[in-house]
Amino acid sequence: MEKTRAVTARNSPDAARDIPEATVARLPVYLRALTTLSDQGTTTCSSEELAVAAGVNSAKLRKDLSYLGSYGTRGVGYDVEYLRYQIAREIGVTQDWPVVIVGIGNLGQALANYSGFRSRGFRVVALLDADPARRAEAVAGLEVRPFADLEQIVHDHGVAIGVIATPAVAAQDVADRMVACGITSILNFAPIVLSVPDLVDVRKVDLSIELQILAYHEQRKMQGAVTEEVTA
Amino acid sequence: MEKTRAVTARNSPDAARDIPEATVARLPVYLRALTTLSDQGTTTCSSEELAVAAGVNSAKLRKDLSYLGSYGTRGVGYDVEYLRYQIAREIGVTQDWPVVIVGIGNLGQALANYSGFRSRGFRVVALLDADPARRAEAVAGLEVRPFADLEQIVHDHGVAIGVIATPAVAAQDVADRMVACGITSILNFAPIVLSVPDLVDVRKVDLSIELQILAYHEQRKMQGAVTEEVTA
DNA sequence: TCCGTTTTGTTCTCCCGTTCACAAACTCCT
DNA sequence: AGGAGTTTGTGAACGGGAGAACAAAACGGA
Ligand SMILES: NC(=O)c1ccc[n+]([C@@H]2O[C@H](COP(=O)([O-])OP(=O)(O)OC[C@H]3O[C@@H](n4cnc5c(N)ncnc54)[C@H](O)[C@@H]3O)[C@@H](O)[C@H]2O)c1
Ligand SMILES: NC(=O)c1ccc[n+]([C@@H]2O[C@H](COP(=O)([O-])OP(=O)(O)OC[C@H]3O[C@@H](n4cnc5c(N)ncnc54)[C@H](O)[C@@H]3O)[C@@H](O)[C@H]2O)c1
């Protein structure tokens, strides 16, 4: 029974192939590059062109795409629109995903105001904040609602994805409540490691960590410069 | 001559060991966990405790730390303060890094107002925006200055790290100008692949991509659920 | 129809990172 | 002093991803 699935042909529309995680992370980049090409009026592109636009090796690009199926034509390349649709479908952004944002402070407001989510398959259906003062005025055309409304909202809109933009101390509580309401994917901006059940996916974005990684390399560049001076 | 370096003992203070990239990305997480433990009054911790706090495997944690040196005591564990300092020193955040933010819109303002950067070794020294209207009022106690001031600011403060929070169309231009001014590390929030010289480090944060990765897994969970229903 | 050109899809190899497992080293108790 | 218990640091096995390289396939021109 398990084997049956593995034997399923690549092109089979409903085959649940397991795409490597590294590839999944790059598919959105290809999608973005294809959208740009499409906007420029390009109808066809080679793996080399697309690879340059996406900032990756062309062999890697072709291997990534081969996990989805054979959507190219040898000697010609890929049809931009067709490939774009196939990737969008594979990722799951041909439909709109309802999203709730919890914690409407500096970052939460910026996220709520960001138009890019909408055009990429996500719709912010509710903004939640524990602080009544935050609820005085609407943000991005949406009222800010009490955190207690979470369950109702998740139920009404069938929300599966939640964004946490609260302070770190509140994040685990918020995550627990989200999970209890049936949310199974969380994007976390709070600088804390969340503990959730196995079936819930968590992705974290930590801007301080990004800067620290840059700082590490920056420091090494400087050390190298000094060493060179000394040995010279 | 090349060999000499390889032979250098791990504990040697000035040894330029090459730490794996994956490890570098985790060091800030350990640093954060150690700071939390320290705040809670913990003076000593085992690799197992720290690993749980950081959300990683304890063997991986120990191997990561071993790249920095032997800072633990067998049978006892690690001194929290000591290890915290060693990691901070290795990353390079014992000193303060001056940072400029370009593009003071929704996201740029949120970043400017974020206090967490300061406590983690970064100091926002200037906010730049091309739009004169943006410069009417100060953000986070800093005036918003014209983009043309970049070179002066970079020169005056010795800025090595720049943050791009402009729309995608402007990002490559901004990056080029940054590089021309001597900035060698860039944190990019615009959804575009930046092209920069080899010696410049770029890290990108793309929130749409994060959501799309979650959507992919979410879709698979649902497919699985449907398949189960059908086969049941 | 056939051959040269182009470009995909895939195989193969190498490298990096993860994890296991254990010896070495340290503490504490008797 | 010695042994039991604990925890680190690391060697070795393993798995996954990156990239080179090539065969298969499509196209176009003669
Ligand atoms: N602002 C940034 O640029 C930035 C950068 C990196 C990381 N972060 C992280 O993102 C998170 C938010 O940052 P911020 O600057 O927007 O903070 P903020 O203080 O401006 O906003 C936090 C919001 O969360 C709300 N909140 C607190 N507890 C809550 C709860 N239990 N339920 C619902 N809402 C609750 C608060 O009322 C507030 O409105 C923090 O964890 C921060 O560390 C922010
Ligand atoms: N807001 C978010 O939550 C969010 C989320 C994901 C990605 N992003 C990305 O971050 C970037 C900024 O988003 P935002 O919502 O803050 O946009 P925004 O439009 O609110 O702000 C952009 C700012 O950049 C300034 N700017 C434009 N061209 C410039 C130039 N050449 N030099 C200097 N400044 C310039 C504009 O004047 C404006 O103030 C965008 O690329 C967006 O795609 C934002």
Image (tube, coloured by chain):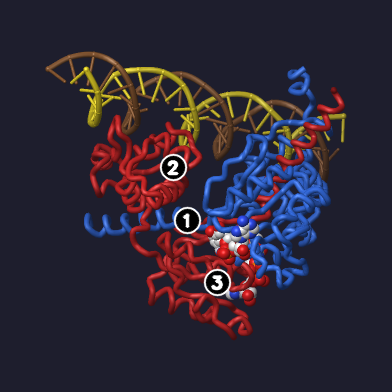
Chain colours: A blue, B red, C yellow, D brown
Q: Residue under label 3, please give it.
A: B102
Secondary structure of residue under mark 2: helix
Mark earlier in primary sequence (1, 2):
2
- Whether residue B124 sits left or right of residue A54 in the image: it is left
Could you tell me if the residues under marks 3 and 1 are in contact, i.e. CB atoms within 8 Å? no
Upstream in the sequence, badge 3 or badge 1? 3
- Report, in whole angstroms, how far the alpha carbon at label 3 lies from the one at label 1: 22 Å
Q: Which residue is mark 1?
A: B198
Which label's residue is closer to the chain start, 3 or 2? 2
Q: Dot 2: few (<14), some (14–19), or many (≥20) neighbours within 10 Å?
A: some
Give whichever of B123, A135 is nearer the camera. A135
Q: Is residue D9 left or right of residue B197?
A: left
Q: Secondary structure at mark 3?
A: strand
Residue A187 on image: x %, y %: 64, 50
Between marks 3 and 1 in the image, the one whose residue lies nearer the viewer: 3
Q: Which amino acid type corresponds to the residue marked 1 in the rendered image?
A: Asp
Q: Is mark 3 within 8 Å of ligand 2?
A: yes
- In this orientation, does residue B189 appear? no
What is the x, y in percent for residue A71? Answer: 79, 39
- Amino acid carrying mark 2 in the image: Thr
Q: Residues within 10 Å of mark 3 (few under 14, many from 20)?
A: many
Please state, as top left, top right, bottom left or bottom right, where the N terminus of chain A lies in the image.
top right
Q: Which residue is mark 2?
A: B23
